Every structure is written in structure tokens, then in C-alpha cells.
């Protein structure tokens, strides 16, 4: 039973890591390859999705890391080994479900918070960005 809790964290982390891939439709894949063209005074609509996806990967990796840490230090809940087989399965499923809900809440809260703090309407006068080799940059000044 030593590795059960570690495995649960690893499983939940893996589910969060692949969640964005599993739920994507063909339309979502088409949206991924579109060119995001900033419009003066607007926040790009795709930016919110990028924050959410980034936080799915971050939280998923945190859960996987916690799982490996629990396995490495042999940390587990001893009472699980004393439970009846059916009860043990129910407790494990509830724990997985609970951790998934916690992960989804963390993703939503963190991505919303970061979006509110960092996402600002595009203003070309404030931008110091210089295009890199191979990039095309359109702006109002036609430089």
C-alpha cells in the first residue's frame, strides 16, 4: 500500500496533463494554428485559452511531482491497507475524484488570476517588441 497514494497523485497529474489533448475537437486543432493578429485596444481572444492550457500543464506536473515525492519518501496513508476491498476501491476513486476537482479549481483560479493581472489590451505604442529572424510583424506604422 506504500505506493497507492503516490500512484494516485501521479495518475491525477497525468490526467490533468492530457486533459487538454483529450477534449480537443478538430475545430480546436484548427484554432491552434491560426495566426493571432493583435488589434489595437483589444485583448486577443486566444490568450485566455493559452493561460488555461499553461496552468493545466503546471498543475499536472505539480501533482506528478508530488506523487514521485511520496513514492521516494515512502509516505502513504496506512489506514488504506486495513480497509475491505470494495471500500478501498471506493475510497481510492473518491480520492482521485477529489484531487481532480482540486486540480481543476486550481487551474481555473490560477489562470483567471494570471489573465487578469497580465492580459492588457494591445497598444502598439507601448510595444518594444522587435521581430526576430523569420517572423512577420504587422503594425499600424508599416515599419
Image: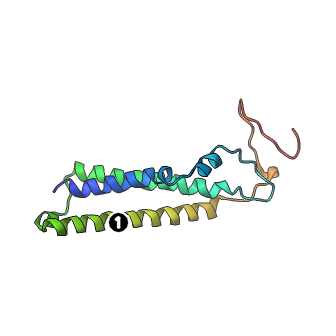
**Image position, residue 50 (x, y; %):** 59, 53
Which residue sits at x=13%, y=68%?
A: 83
Residue nearest the observer in this picture, 22 or 64:
22
Quarter of the image for the N terminus: give it: bottom left
Q: x, y (%) of residue 120?
A: 71, 59
Q: Pinpoint residue 133: horizontal percent, then vertical percent.
A: 71, 30
- Image coordinates for residue 135, horizontal then vertical, percent: 72, 34
Quarter holding the C terminus?
top right
Q: Quadrant of residue 79?
A: bottom left
> Front-most of 30 and 107?
30
Furthest toward the top, the residue is 133
Q: Is residue 62 visible?
A: no
Question: In the shown orientation, is residue 46 left or right of residue 126?
Answer: left
Q: Is residue 3 visible?
A: yes
In the image, residue 102 sits, relative to residue 45, either above or below, namely below
Question: SS at mark 1?
Answer: helix
Q: Residue 93 or 109: which is nearer the viewer? A: 93
Return the residue found at the far right. 141
Q: Residues within 10 Å of mark 1 (few under 14, many from 20)?
A: few
Residue at numbered disc 1: 97
Tell whether 139 sits left or right of 71.
right
Left/right placement of residue 126 relative to residue 140 reads left
- Up the image or down, 29 lies above or below 88; here it is above
Residue drawn where x is 46% and y is 54% of the image: 19
Q: Is residue 117 left or right of residue 102?
A: right
Q: Tell me the colour scheme of the image.
A: rainbow
Q: Is residue 103 above or below residue 21?
A: below
Q: Quadrant of residue 121?
A: bottom right
Amino acid at each position: 500500500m506504500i505506493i497507492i497514494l503516490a500512484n494516485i497523485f501521479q495518475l491525477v497529474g497525468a490526467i490533468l496533463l492530457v486533459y487538454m489533448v483529450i477534449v480537443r475537437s478538430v475545430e480546436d486543432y484548427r484554432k491552434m494554428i491560426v495566426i493571432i493578429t493583435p488589434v489595437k485596444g483589444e485583448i486577443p481572444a486566444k490568450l485566455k485559452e493559452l493561460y488555461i492550457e499553461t496552468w493545466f500543464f503546471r498543475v499536472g506536473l505539480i501533482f506528478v511531482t508530488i506523487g514521485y515525492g511520496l513514492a521516494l519518501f515512502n509516505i502513504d496513508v496506512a489506514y488504506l491497507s486495513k480497509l475491505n476491498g470494495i471500500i478501498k476501491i471506493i475510497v481510492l476513486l473518491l480520492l482521485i475524484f477529489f484531487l481532480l476537482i482540486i486540480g481543476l479549481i486550481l487551474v481555473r483560479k490560477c489562470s483567471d488570476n494570471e489573465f487578469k493581472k497580465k492580459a492588457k489590451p494591445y497598444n502598439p505604442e507601448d510595444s518594444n517588441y522587435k521581430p526576430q529572424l523569420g517572423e512577420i510583424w504587422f503594425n499600424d506604422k508599416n515599419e
